[in-house]
Image (cartoon, helix red, strand yellow):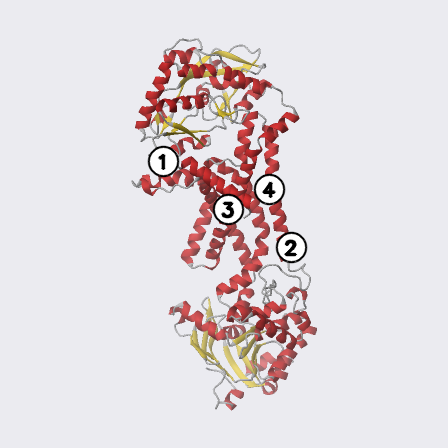
């Protein structure tokens, strides 16, 4: 827990138990440490942006949150589900699978490359999780899928296949697909990086709207302007550590750590 | 599976049951094995599609003498002896020469025919007094015969082994080779009627044909020898061989009986007459048409072997691919071993091992009752299926690997388990990718299914052998059979292409039904 030069909202709302709480997360790939003990608390309804140079571990951190990557050590607690990663490699994989599954039920994920299923229509994409993963009746899932597509302004595209849509439309569909599982936290892994510049705004608009509705969202992003405009606070990572957690304006205007300042200078 | 295929399978199963269903305990039966597609005058199908031949007549007389009912079991020439070990029949009679090196492996009856090698060359050639005179000349014969062994010992002779005696004699007639050395009965039936050929020189060597029994069946050997002796003494053997034009001084001497034939050579004359008439296009078509029951059965067999074989290949191949891509290391290792061994060894050998090798497995370990004796249909289908499974596994593996990792991650993030992700996301997408190579393999399997004729099944290739040897019309029959293979393959190609188009995402119109794996498939609610 070294090197955190600031405290954001985390400090201000300490009276309430945070919705997401991560302690001492470690992760290595082939002996190369990527996360070197990362901790973070996120309150319900927060919109948090994680920024940092390439290779700093921010995507790995996000992917650990719903166990797409299994951490080597540390503790993850999201909406009442806690997984202690100490000695997980010795635990029966069945138990881990079951716990990870429980965790994923509460977490929605949006990927840089959308990862929509190209052999299904947009509507079917939103139905797959609820129907197969959760056993929701087809008709109910269909109605819910249509509602969510309407929410992201894609109601008329329900019967289309992903390849028949623009990148921005696909990413909005991917958000609708994640929302179909009724998550309590939404994770975004560079959601606009694969988009043409003119398509970025429509995706960010959806995320802003979700924020106003009270959704808890964590975004790994290079969109500094969006991070500054929409985030409740910003997490700066470098070399496997969280360096600084600051209010969105403060970090841009008055970074406490030299490394943060150095990174942000390139965007100004 | 539609009715005709099912019928084909059932018919094949029934044939198998009839062929191997008679147990040794049933003393009233004499099961005899032969390759009736090889040649006249031993055992063959005549122009009327009836089984005949001097060996056929001998077996009928012998069985009567022994008070048994003769039951014929077909097997291909290469598998005849192995079939004895498998217990498919009690004896083999197929012009097999008694030699000391074979005698260690099997039991022979006393000779039922004694003859010699006859040299045949083009009309007008100077007579050959000995094989030494043939030095530097190209001489044809059949593979795996005593004549071949003799020619290989003669200095300077260039040996040309043929599959079919008809082709060998044809090549002498049109000057491609100098002459042919073959057993006298073959020369008598295939060369003597040809006005361009002549018998040349003295009888070479001496060949004795014997019936073959399994090594542990001395009782039957004694019984057959006794009956055979009785047939010789009564003159029945002389009658049979005379009718077939095979009563020579050699055999008369061997049996200690008078040299002149006891009867006219009516069966020989009939054979020559039936092949003398020049086949016009019309008579050929009539001949093909008259074979339609055989062709229909053969087509159904080829189809059912291919379809069931492909079903096994797809099922096993899919399992192997999943093991290899997603399994823990012991599974991965096992799947890889299977695939490499199967891909790296010939299908023909695999079929032999499954059909003839597995029944001996128990004997090898001293427990004959534990041998695995698969019926021919299932041996063929399992052999083909396992072989193609190795190729299918690699197709599917490539298909599974071609799906981006993010697809599975997307599924997992939606709360699907790994197997649900495979089933609903990864496999449906790879299905379309592997369809073209799988279609390719099916067509290839359809043709490779011809190898099941090695495990006693009469498929299209077996039908080709029978019709061609019966009519000597190798070219026309070949075209006919090739056309049938092509015709039965095409519908599957069309079906595959149609499916591929249905699944093609990029060419689909918005809202068009994808057809498979659809979550919103129109289901009555």
Q: Is residue A2 left or right of residue B505?
A: left
Image coordinates of residue A99 in percent, x first then y, are 44, 73
Image location (x, y in percent) of residue B119: 49, 15
Q: Are tags 3 and 4 found on a single chain?
A: yes
Gap in angstroms between the C-alphas marked 2 and 1: 53 Å
Measure how far apart labels 3 and 2 are at the Cα level. 25 Å
Q: Is residue B121 above or below residue B495?
A: above
> In which chain is the residue bearing label 3?
B
Disc 3 to disc 1, C-alpha distance:
28 Å
Q: Name the element at disc 1.
A: loop
- Residue sitting at x 54%, y 73%: A59
Residue topped by disc 3:
B308
State the separation of the CA atoms marked 4 and 2: 21 Å
Give B152 or B224, whichever is nearer the viewer. B224
Q: Earlier in the sequence, mark 2 or mark 1?
A: 1
Q: Are marks 4 and 2 on the same chain?
A: yes
Q: Earlier in the sequence, mark 3 or mark 2?
A: 3
**Mark-to-mark CA distance, 3 and 4:** 15 Å
A244 or B312, which lies in front?
Answer: B312
Q: Is A259 placed left or right of A164 in the picture?
A: left
Q: Residues within 10 Å of mark 3 (few under 14, many from 20)?
A: some
Q: Given the image, what chain letter belongs to the residue carrying mark 4?
A: B
Viewer-nearest of discs 3 and 2: 3
> Left or right: where does residue B281 sit relative to residue A216?
right
* Relative depth, front residue between A87 and A142: A142
Which residue is label 1 attached to? B23
What kind of element bears circle 2?
A: helix
């Amino acid at each position: 827990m070294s090197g955190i030069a600031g405290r954001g909202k985390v400090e201000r709302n300490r009276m309430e138990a945070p919705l997401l709480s991560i302690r001492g997360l470690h992760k290595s790939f082939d002996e190369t440490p990527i996360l070197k003990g990362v901790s973070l608390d996120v309150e319900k309804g927060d919109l948090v942006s994680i920024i940092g140079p390439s290779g700093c571990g921010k995507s790995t951190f996000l992917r650990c949150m719903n166990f797409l990557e299994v951490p080597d050590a540390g503790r993850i607690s999201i909406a009442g589900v806690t997984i202690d990663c100490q000695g997980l490699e010795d635990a029966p994989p069945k138990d881990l699978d079951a716990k990870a599954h429980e965790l994923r039920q509460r977490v929605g994920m949006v990927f840089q490359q959308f990862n929509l299923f190209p052999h299904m229509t947009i509507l079917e994409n939103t139905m797959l999780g609820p129907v197969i993963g959760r056993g929701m009746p087809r008709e109910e899932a269909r109605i819910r899928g249509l509602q969510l597509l309407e929410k992201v302004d894609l109601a008329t595209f329900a019967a289309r296949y992903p390849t028949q849509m623009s990148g921005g439309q696909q990413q909005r569909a991917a958000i609708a697909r994640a929302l179909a599982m009724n998550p309590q936290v939404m994770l975004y892994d560079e959601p606009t990086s694969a988009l043409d510049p003119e398509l970025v705004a429509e995706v960010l608009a959806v995320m802003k709207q979700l924020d106003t509705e009270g959704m808890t969202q964590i975004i790994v992003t290079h969109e500094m302007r969006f991070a500054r405009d929409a985030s409740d606070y910003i997490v700066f990572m470098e070399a496997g550590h969280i360096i600084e957690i600051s209010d969105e304006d403060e970090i841009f205007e008055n970074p406490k750590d030299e490394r943060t300042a150095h990174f942000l200078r390139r965007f100004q | 599976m539609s009715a005709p295929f099912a019928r084909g399978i059932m018919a094949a199963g029934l044939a198998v049951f009839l062929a191997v269903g008679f147990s040794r305990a049933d003393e009233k039966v004499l099961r005899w094995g032969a390759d009736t597609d090889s040649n006249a005058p031993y055992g063959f199908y005549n122009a009327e599609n009836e089984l005949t031949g001097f060996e056929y007549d001998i077996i009928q007389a012998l069985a009567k003498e022994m008070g048994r009912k003769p039951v014929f079991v077909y097997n291909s020439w290469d598998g005849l002896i192995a079939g004895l070990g498998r217990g498919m029949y009690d004896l083999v009679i197929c012009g097999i020469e008694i030699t000391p090196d074979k005698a260690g492996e099997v039991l022979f009856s006393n000779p039922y025919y004694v003859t010699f090698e006859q040299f045949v060359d083009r009309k007008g050639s100077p007579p050959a007094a000995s094989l030494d005179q043939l030095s530097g000349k190209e001489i044809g014969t059949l593979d795996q015969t005593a004549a071949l062994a003799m020619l290989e010992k003669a200095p300077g002779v260039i040996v040309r082994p043929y599959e079919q005696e008809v082709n060998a004699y044809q090549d002498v007639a049109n000057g491609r080779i100098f002459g042919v050395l073959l057993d006298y009965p073959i020369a008598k039936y295939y060369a003597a009627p040809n006005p361009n050929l002549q018998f040349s020189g003295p009888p070479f060597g001496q060949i004795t044909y014997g019936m073959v029994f399994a090594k542990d069946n001395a009782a039957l050997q004694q019984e057959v020898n006794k009956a055979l002796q009785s047939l010789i003494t009564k003159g029945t053997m002389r009658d049979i061989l005379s009718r077939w034009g095979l009563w020579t001084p050699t055999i008369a001497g061997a049996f200690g009986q008078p040299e002149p034939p006891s009867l006219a050579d009516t069966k020989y004359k009939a054979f020559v007459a039936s092949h003398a008439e020049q086949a016009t296009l019309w008579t050929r078509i009539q001949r093909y048409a008259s074979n339609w029951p055989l062709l229909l059965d053969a087509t159904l067999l080829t189809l059912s072997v291919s379809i069931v074989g492909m079903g096994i290949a797809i099922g096993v191949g899919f399992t192997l691919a999943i093991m290899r891509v997603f399994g823990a290391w012991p599974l991965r290792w096992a799947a890889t071993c299977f695939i490499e061994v199967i891909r790296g060894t010939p299908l023909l050998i695999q079929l032999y091992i499954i059909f003839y090798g597995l029944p001996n497995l128990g004997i090898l370990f001293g427990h004959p009752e534990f041998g695995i004796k698969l019926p021919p249909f299932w041996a063929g289908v399992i052999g083909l299926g396992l072989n193609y499974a190795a190729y299918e596994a690699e197709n599917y593996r490539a298909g599974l690997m071609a799906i981006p990792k993010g697809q599975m991650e997307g599924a997992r993030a939606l709360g699907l388990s790994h197997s649900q992700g495979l089933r609903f996301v990864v496999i449906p997408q790879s299905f379309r990718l592997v369809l073209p190579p799988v279609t390719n393999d099916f067509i290839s399997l359809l043709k490779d299914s011809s190898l099941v004729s090695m495990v006693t099944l009469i498929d299209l290739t077996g039908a080709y052998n029978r019709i061609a040897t019966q009519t000597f019309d190798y070219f026309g029959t070949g075209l006919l059979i090739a056309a049938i293979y092509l015709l039965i393959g095409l519908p599957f190609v069309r079906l595959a292409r149609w499916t591929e188009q249905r699944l093609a995402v990029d060419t689909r119109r918005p809202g068009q039904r994808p057809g498979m794996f659809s979550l919103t498939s129109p289901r009555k609610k």
